[in-house]
Each structure stands twice: as structure tokens, then as C-alpha cells.
Image (tube, rainbow, N blue to C red):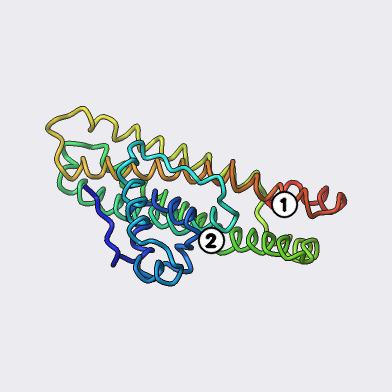
């Protein structure tokens, strides 16, 4: 049984169990800004019952059977971005590095018996080379851009001026979706290369661990892109429709804002 202790830091809990992010959002606890606080500290500051919070966190973990992460209905744009960046992106980067390391070791130890491992090493190296810049661009350009628009709209700021000034920084929505489809195809190819290992009882432990890591990467990436494409984009489009004049809207409708 997985247990959450009151002395654990929020950032460590969310990193280990992404499904708990929903609970923190429901309690209006920011796991980004308040991530360095422990359960005890944040509950004392917010006058929250720490025992109830721990119970809800444990329930979220124990009930997390499908591997599918669902956003809470009340998640704001900052909440969505925080989940994407500090949960999914962090896990993807860590798991891809782990998978690459496992694939290299497995190819050295078992490559003569499983030639597919050499192709897996090559494909993972290419995936890492292409995907990391994509994730970094989202974190350093796209997400800050979204947040600037969101906060300006919330504070009745000059959203149109922000957009006009920063159009060269934006990422066409078709390019983002194209990248997502490209990476999904690459992950599917990796899945096909490792699928045979699942039905072989004699498969070495290191290859089984590699296969599980690749499955986790595939699941997390698909969940992250679903949130981006269907939830975050729609949220930003609603803001766009609400605050932009028809003229500006027509000029930038093809961009991800």
C-alpha cells in the first residue's frame, strides 16, 4: 500500500504520484509555488485538516488503476500548465533518459539474442534529440505566452497589445499538432519493436524493465497531448474569443493563442 506522510514535500508527492495533482487543485494548493512545503506546513498555513488531505491523497493513489490522468473540472489555465510542465514533462524527460540508458545496457547484454534492441537504442536517441527541444519550447515560450494572455485577460489588461507584440514568438497550432502526431508515430514504432518481449517468459529482467518504461512514456505522452490539444487549446480559444476584437482574431486565428 502506498502511503503519504504529513512530512512529505508536495513537489515530491506530485512527482511520484501525478494523480494527486487533482487533489491539491481541489484543495486550492499550488504544487508549483508551494511545492517545497510539506503537508504539515501547508495545512498549518491554510488552516486545512492535514489528516483529511492525506486520506484524499491516498485514495487518489489507491484508486488510480488505469494509468489515465483526469483533470478536475475546475482546473484553470495555470493549473493545466502546471500539471503539464511539472508532472507530465518532468516524467517524460526522466523516463526517456531512463529508457535510453536501459536500452544501451540491454543491447550490450542481450543484443545478440534480441537484435531489435539495437534499433530501439537508435530510435530512442532520435526521440530524445527531437522531443526534448519540443518540450523545452513549450515550457519556455508557449506556456509563458499562454499565462501572459490568461493573466492579462483576468486583470483586464491590454491583451491585444501583448499578442501583437509577441506574434513572432508564437507557435502555429498546425505545427504543434504535427509534432505531436510525429512523436506518437515514433512511440508506436517503439511499442511495436518491444511488443514481442511481453509474451516471452524467458525475457531478461532488464528488457522487461525497458518495455515497462516505454509503455509508461507512451501513456504519459498521449495523456499530455490530449490535455494540450483538447483542454488547454480550447481554454485559450475561449479567452481569445472573449477578449480579442474581430480584426485581431482574424489575423491570428491560425496561431496557438
* Horizontal and vertical percent position of residue 99: 30, 50
Q: Earlier in the sequence, mark 1 or mark 2?
A: 2
Badge nearest the viewer, 1 or 2:
1
> Vertical placement of 110 versus 18: above or below?
above
Label 2 crowding class (10 Å Cα cut-off): few <14, some 14-19, many 20+? some
The dot on residue 139 is: 2
Label 1 crowding class (10 Å Cα cut-off): few <14, some 14-19, many 20+? some
- Distance in Å between CA atoms under marks 1 and 2: 20 Å
Most foreground residue, 16 or 21:
21
Left or right, 179 with reference to 115: right
Q: Secondary structure at mark 1?
A: helix
Residue where numbered disc 1 is placed: 239
Residue farthest top in this picture: 199
> Vertical placement of 32 versus 200: above or below?
below
Most foreground residue, 103 or 13:
13
Q: Secondary structure at mark 2?
A: helix
Please report the residue visible at 42 percent of the width from the left and 63 percent of the height from the top: 48
Left or right, 98 with reference to 1: right
Residue farthest left in this picture: 202
Please report the residue visible at 45 percent of the width from the left and 62 percent of the height from the top: 31
Left or right, 101 with reference to 186: left
* Horizontal and vertical percent position of residue 132: 46, 56
Please report the residue visible at 53 percent of the width from the left and 61 percent of the height from the top: 139
Quadrant position of residue 165: bottom right
Q: Does the residue at mark 1 contact the one at mark 2 (Cβ under 8 Å)? A: no
* Horizontal and vertical percent position of residue 214: 33, 43
Left or right, 161 with reference to 143: right
* Horizontal and vertical percent position of residue 201: 14, 30
Amino acid at each position: 500500500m502506498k502511503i503519504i506522510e504529513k512530512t512529505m514535500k508536495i513537489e515530491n508527492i506530485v512527482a511520484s504520484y501525478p494523480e494527486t495533482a487533482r487533489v491539491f487543485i481541489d484543495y486550492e494548493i499550488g504544487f508549483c509555488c508551494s511545492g517545497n512545503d510539506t503537508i504539515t506546513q501547508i495545512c498549518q498555513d491554510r488552516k486545512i485538516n492535514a489528516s483529511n488531505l492525506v486520506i484524499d491523497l491516498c485514495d487518489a493513489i489507491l484508486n488510480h488503476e488505469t494509468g489515465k490522468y483526469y483533470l478536475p473540472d475546475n482546473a484553470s489555465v495555470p493549473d493545466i500548465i502546471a500539471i503539464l510542465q511539472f508532472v507530465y514533462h518532468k516524467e517524460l524527460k526522466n523516463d526517456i533518459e531512463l529508457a535510453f540508458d536501459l536500452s544501451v545496457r540491454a543491447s550490450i547484454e542481450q543484443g545478440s539474442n534480441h537484435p531489435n534492441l539495437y534499433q530501439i537504442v537508435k530510435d530512442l536517441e532520435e526521440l530524445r534529440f527531437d522531443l526534448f527541444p519540443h518540450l523545452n519550447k513549450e515550457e519556455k515560450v508557449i506556456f509563458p505566452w499562454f499565462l501572459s494572455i490568461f493573466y492579462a485577460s483576468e486583470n483586464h489588461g491590454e491583451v491585444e497589445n501583448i499578442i501583437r507584440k509577441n506574434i513572432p514568438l508564437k507557435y502555429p497550432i498546425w505545427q504543434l499538432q504535427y509534432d505531436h502526431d510525429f512523436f506518437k508515430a515514433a512511440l508506436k514504432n517503439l511499442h511495436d519493436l518491444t511488443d514481442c518481449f511481453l509474451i516471452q517468459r524467458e525475457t531478461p529482467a532488464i528488457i522487461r524493465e525497458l518495455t515497462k518504461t516505454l509503455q509508461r512514456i507512451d501513456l504519459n505522452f498521449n495523456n499530455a497531448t490530449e490535455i494540450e490539444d483538447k483542454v488547454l487549446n480550447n481554454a485559450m480559444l475561449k479567452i481569445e474569443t472573449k477578449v480579442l476584437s474581430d480584426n485581431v482574431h482574424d489575423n491570428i486565428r491560425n496561431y496557438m493563442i
